[in-house]
Image (cartoon, rainbow, N blue to C red):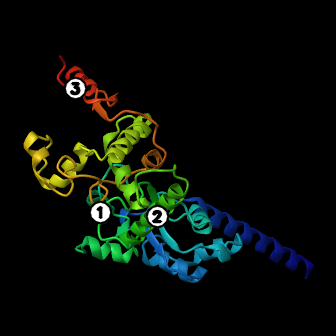
């Protein structure tokens, strides 16, 4: 009897070792996924059995029970997380289990760049394959309503940054995050602004920040350029900023600004109209906002590009004209 028990124990031990070895081999062997199986989605509130069956349905596993057994043996069954995942085609069942355990879901990202327009922002979202498209065909005002904006013009209201999100996140959700970020940063910066600035509210400061963003090739010049425009506003001088004129031209702008463009009146032509344009002309970054709210103290009223991204600043028109001849006309 004892001999039979020993034989049974040895046989059981041998079978256990074989099973363990077989499962271990399965756990570390590449699944060799087809491309169509590398993007998977695990539904929310899914248990281990449901997850295994979803993996079978999506072509990741040939059958569910070995994956279920490994998860139970490693005590991972309670920690598997829902979400979208991108899998390496040679991922092993064990690596897959760890990915689901750690919630390494596939993230999408989009980067909105300082100085770009709202139209360009929408284009970026429209071509991003990780974004769920929900605002295609909606007007600017309709989009603004969806992000709870009180404005009717969208330009400049969204903060330029890189935003990360789960795949299939709606475009309006990303826009809302960008909008909220801008409103928060602008409100904090406005509260800490210098005294006696020529802006009646933070929106006017945002308009000026967008102009500074477009005028500046050298980041360290932002406060100085902001100082020039601050002086002009205080004196009642026209801003005469080309980027605003170009923005007002829209599709008519072909890469060069001509004299006739400077005299053609539009709401954004700061050569023909006093004060600020009616809205921002691009997305300003935090540095441009800070520059406008903390401009350099200067007597300069003019600046001209040197051709290398920097500018020559002048206190009077005569000095400015000499700088134009030197740097623009190359005489």
Query: What separation in Å lies between label 2 and label 3 (alpha carbons)?
Result: 40 Å
Residue 209 is situated, as x and y percent measured from the top left of the image, at 38, 50
Helix, strand or loop under label 2? helix
Q: Residue at x 32, y 63 (%)?
A: 125
Residue 157 is situated, as x and y percent measured from the top left of the image, at 37, 62
| In the image: residue 261, left or right of residue 3 | left
Residue 99 visible? The answer is yes
Tag on residue 321?
Answer: 3
Q: Nearer the viewer, mark 2 or mark 1?
A: 2
Q: Earlier in the sequence, mark 2 or mark 1?
A: 1
Q: Nearer the viewer, residue 52 or 28?
A: 52
Q: Give above or below for 113 relative to 24.
A: above
Q: Give above or below for 272 relative to 109.
A: above
| Pointer 1 local density, CA inside 10 Å: few below 14, some 14–19, many at least 20 | some
Q: Nearer the viewer, residue 321 or 131?
A: 321
Query: What separation in Å lies between label 2 and label 1 (alpha carbons)?
Result: 19 Å
Q: Quadrant of residue 163?
A: bottom left
């Amino acid at each position: 009897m004892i001999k039979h028990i020993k034989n049974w124990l040895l046989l059981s031990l041998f079978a256990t070792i074989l099973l363990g070895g077989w499962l271990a081999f399965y756990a570390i062997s590449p699944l060799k996924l087809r491309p169509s199986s590398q993007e998977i989605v695990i539904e929310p509130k899914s248990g281990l059995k449901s997850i295994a069956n979803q993996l079978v349905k999506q072509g990741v596993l040939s059958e569910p029970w070995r994956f279920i057994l490994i998860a139970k043996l490693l005590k991972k069954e309670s920690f598997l997380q829902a979400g979208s995942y991108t899998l390496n085609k040679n991922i092993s069942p064990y690596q897959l289990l760890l990915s689901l355990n750690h919630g390494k879901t596939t993230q999408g990202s989009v980067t909105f760049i300082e100085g770009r327009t709202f139209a360009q922002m929408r284009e970026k979202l429209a071509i991003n394959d990780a974004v769920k498209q929900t605002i295609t065909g909606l007007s600017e005002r309709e989009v603004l309503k969806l992000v709870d904006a009180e404005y009717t013009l969208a330009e400049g209201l969204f903060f330029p940054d890189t935003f990360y999100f789960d795949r299939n996140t709606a475009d309006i959700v990303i826009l809302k995050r960008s909008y909220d970020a801008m409103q928060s940063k602008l409100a904090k910066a406005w509260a800490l602004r210098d005294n006696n600035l020529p802006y009646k509210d933070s929106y006017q400061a945002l308009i000026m920040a967008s102009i500074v963003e477009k005028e500046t090739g050298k980041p360290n010049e932002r406060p100085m350029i902001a100082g020039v425009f601050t002086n002009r506003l205080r004196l009642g001088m026209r801003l005469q900023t080309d980027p605003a004129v170009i923005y007002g031209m829209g599709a008519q702008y072909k890469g060069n600004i001509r004299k006739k463009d400077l005299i053609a009146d539009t709401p954004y032509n700061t050569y023909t109209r006093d004060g600020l344009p009616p809205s921002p002309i691009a997305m300003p970054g935090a540095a441009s906002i800070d520059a406008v709210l903390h401009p350099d103290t200067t007597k300069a009223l003019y600046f001209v590009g040197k051709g290398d991204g920097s500018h020559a600043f002048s206190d009077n028109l005569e000095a400015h004209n000499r700088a134009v001849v030197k740097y623009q006309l190359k005489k």
